[in-house]
Image: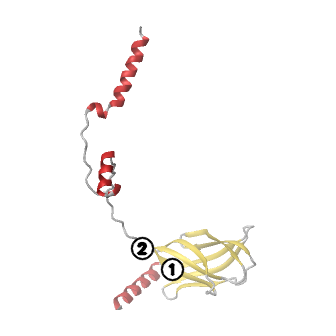
Amino acid sequence: MWQEFQILLVLFIHLSAALQGTGDLYLLDHSNERHNLAILEISDEFGAKLDLIEDTIVHGKYRVCGTFQEYYDECFSFTEINHRLSHELELLVIGDKVVKMSLHWDGAIDGITPVIKEVGKGAVPESFKLRKRTMTYESKKKAERKNTGTAAFEEDLVEEKTFVQKNWKFIVLGVICYAFVSSGSK
């Protein structure tokens, strides 16, 4: 338990130390008029802090845009604002850079609450080679007699075929071409 707490504490300190700076959050209406919404400030002392500039916004549909460090003037969400602001601003971080901002409605929140999430490396799936399995008529009948079906796990037997059995289509095509060419020269 104590180790988990220490790991979370180190992760939180790393997050707050790695990501620092200020930015702003604003809305654009249908006529591209800018409405300043909030100032986002992330520091060692306060963590993530969002100060609302404009509390009352006219009912309507808006594009939500934001700037933070190298994340410039990106409109990242489209929302309809009814009465009061009840949103969660999610900042997706890799290292010390914001890669994605998103705004989610949450009725339990009063105002806008910033949440910082750091992206980690995911699990690498185990790779294995797939093997194509084809069954002949005889092997299907044999599997039916054994009640194993087509999903029987046994080694495929390599059938030895003669040259004529393997290449009969090319031989027939060659004979037809020969007959056509020889009849045309007479």
Regarding mark 1 in the picture, which secondary structure is present there? strand
Residue named by callout 1? 116
Residue 100 lies left or right of residue 149; in this view the side is: right
Q: CA distance from mark 2 to mark 1?
A: 13 Å
The quadrant the C terminus occupies is top left
- Badge 2 marks a residue whose secondary structure is loop
At label 2, the amino acid type is Gly
What residue sits 74% from the left and 68% below the top? 30
From the image, tell me which residue sits under label 2: 120
Query: Which amino acid type is marked by label 1?
Result: Ile
Estimate the x, y position of residue 114 in percent, counting from the top left: 56, 82
- Residue visible at 41% across and 87% down? 9
> In the figure, 157 relative to 173: above or below?
below
Query: Foreground residue, 55 or 179?
Result: 179
Horizontal and vertical percent position of residue 154: 26, 55
Q: Position of residue 78 (x, y in %)?
A: 65, 70
In the picture as drawn, the residue positioned furthest to the front comes out as 145
- Number of other residues with Cα within 10 Å of mark 2, as a class: few under 14, some 14 to 19, many 20 or more: few
Foreground of the two, 80 or 115 = 80
Q: Is residue 81 left or right of residue 182?
A: right
From what the image shows, is residue 107 above or below residue 151?
below
Split into 4 quadrants, where in the image is the N terminus? bottom left
